[in-house]
Image: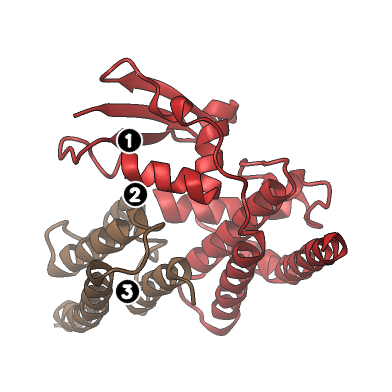
């Protein structure tokens, strides 16, 4: 798969995880505008751990996106691994978030 | 250090509507942390020169549709680069965007969440496919409506295509009305016509290439 399509696939993986939660409105993308809209629609605090992790993942994917024309470098591989690890963290944080909501 | 700032995209074509924003590009001789990456696409001068020599579609886009808005040294960096190398990656790029479309359609039809994102990716694949195709034919169209502007036009209506456009704007800017179930069903119906259209265009191009060899 091309680097371009890999990046979109990584973004989709994060959205699948986030949107598996019960939200008033789902997260439409990892752009700053889409995240801001999702935070507002679901009345989440900007400083909740889940939102911070999503912004962190978006930042890394945004960096990769800005490097879209670059060849695969060690930096790219490292960041891709970071994004995969963040996706896992988001999944764990979402579970904690749901548990807290249900208390 | 020299800095060159450009506007590019829809604003330079005069394609303005409520959902338009202004695409900004910063070309820098060295990193400048003061330039906000959320507002600007940031490229080094060196990388821009590489894109020019690759004949990359983005280089052609900037060559044909960018306007200098600030130069720290009085030069127009992009204009001075002249014309990019002739675009030669049409077959690879078409394959990449066909694959993105299929993956996104697969996701749309097999999962119940992130449908707006999937449709946004289908828009991206379709628009980029059409833009690369037009560039390969020597008549580049960079508009978001490029699939509807080709001679071999996308066989769906503007109204149907606008649902894809809306998904893209929701995904990249968080702006607009959410898609309804009817919208999503309309996309599921029109998507297969897009797959066939992509296949036909790619086959037509390959046949014409073989005739020229």
Residue behind mark 3: A18
Q: CA distance from mark 3 to mark 2?
A: 16 Å
What tint does the image give chain B?
Answer: red
Q: Chain of mark 3?
A: A
Image quadrant containing the N terminus of chain B: top left
Q: Foreground mark, 1 or 3?
A: 1
Q: CA distance from mark 1 to mark 3?
A: 35 Å
For numbered disc 3, what is the local secondary structure?
helix
Q: Chain of mark 1?
A: B
Q: Which chain is brown?
A: A
The verdict on a common chain for dots 3 and 2 is yes
The verdict on a common chain for dots 1 and 2 is no
Residue behind mark 1: B27
Q: Chain of mark 2?
A: A
Question: Residue at coordinates 73% horizontally, 40% vertically from top-left?
Answer: B139
Depicted B152 relative to depicted B142: above or below: below
Quarter where residue B106 is shown:
bottom right
Residue behind mark 2: A33
């Amino acid at each position: 798969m091309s680097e371009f399509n890999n990046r979109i696939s990584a973004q989709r993986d994060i959205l699948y995880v986030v949107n598996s939660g019960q939200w008033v409105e789902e997260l439409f993308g990892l752009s700053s505008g889409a995240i801001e809209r999702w935070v507002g629609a679901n009345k989440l605090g900007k400083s909740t751990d889940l939102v911070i992790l999503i912004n962190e993942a978006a930042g890394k994917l945004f960096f990769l996106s800005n490097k879209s024309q670059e060849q695969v470098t060690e930096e790219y591989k490292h960041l891709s691994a970071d994004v995969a690890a963040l996706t896992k963290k988001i999944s764990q944080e979402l579970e904690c978030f749901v548990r807290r909501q249900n208390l | 250090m020299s800095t060159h700032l450009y506007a590019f995209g829809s604003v330079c074509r005069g394609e303005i509507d409520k959902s338009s924003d202004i695409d900004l590009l910063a070309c820098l001789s060295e990193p400048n942390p003061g330039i906000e990456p959320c507002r600007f696409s940031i490229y080094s001068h060196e990388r821009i020169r590489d894109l020019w020599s690759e004949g990359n579609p983005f280089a052609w886009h900037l060559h044909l549709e960018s306007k200098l808005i600030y130069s720290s040294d009085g030069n127009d960096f992009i204009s001075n680069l002249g014309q990019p190398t002739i675009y030669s990656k049409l077959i690879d790029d078409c394959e990449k965007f066909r694959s993105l479309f299929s993956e996104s359609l697969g996701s749309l039809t097999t999962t119940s969440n992130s449908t707006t994102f999937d449709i946004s990716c289908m828009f991206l694949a379709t628009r980029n496919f059409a833009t690369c195709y037009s560039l390969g034919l020597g008549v580049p169209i960079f508009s978001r409506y490029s699939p509807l502007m080709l001679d071999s036009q996308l066989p769906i209506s503007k109204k149907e295509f606008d649902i894809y456009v809306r998904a893209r704007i929701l995904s990249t800017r968080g702006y607009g009305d959410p898609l309804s179930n009817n919208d999503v069903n309309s996309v599921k119906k029109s998507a297969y016509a897009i797959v066939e259209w992509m296949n036909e265009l790619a086959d037509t191009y390959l046949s014409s290439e073989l005739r020229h060899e």
